[in-house]
Amino acid sequence: MLSALETLWNEVRALLPPHTRVMRLGVTLFDLTRASERQLDMLLDDDPVRLQWERITEAIDALNRKHGRTLVSIGPWTPPPGGYAGGKISYTRIPSAEDFW
């Protein structure tokens, strides 16, 4: 790890303008596992349990699109206290009409 960091650091220093002062450099390692453990590819369809739940989720989404967004849910569905809670402010997209019923 330190060898790889030194290689990267030497490449960066060659690209920095002269007299540049780096105040801090941090490296964080987390969720480390043994090299012998297999890391599944998120895009690889080889986990039968995940595939089963994806099919179930797709079926639920299709039914909810066709018949109303809360026709089918996993677990109990309870409306918000007081009933309709109104549209919410979205910072990532323009709300659609379905967001308000």
Image (cartoon, rainbow, N blue to C red):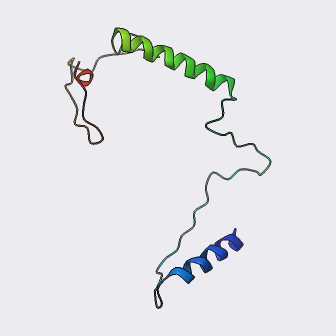
Q: Nearer the viewer, residue 62 or 26?
A: 62
The residue shown at (67%, 53%) is 32
Q: Nearer the viewer, residue 12 or 78?
A: 12
Counting from the top left corner in percent of width and height, residue 19 is at: 46, 91
Q: Quadrant of the N terminus?
A: bottom right
In the figure, residue 30 lies in which quadrant? bottom right
Instruction: Identify the residue at the far front of this view.
Output: 15
Count how many numbered circles sit on residues in the image: 0
**Looking at the image, can residue 86 be seen?**
yes
Instruction: Identify the residue at the far bottom of this view.
Output: 19
Vertical order, 93 against 36 (above or below):
above
Instruction: Identify the residue at the far right of this view.
Output: 36
Q: Is residue 62 left or right of residue 8?
A: left
**Looking at the image, can residue 73 be seen?**
no
Q: Is residue 9 left or right of residue 23?
A: right
Q: Is residue 39 left or right of residue 74?
A: right
Counting from the top left corner in percent of width and height, residue 18 is at: 48, 90
Counting from the top left corner in percent of width and height, residue 34 is at: 76, 51
Q: Is residue 60 left or right of residue 12?
A: left
Q: Nearer the viewer, residue 11 or 84?
A: 11
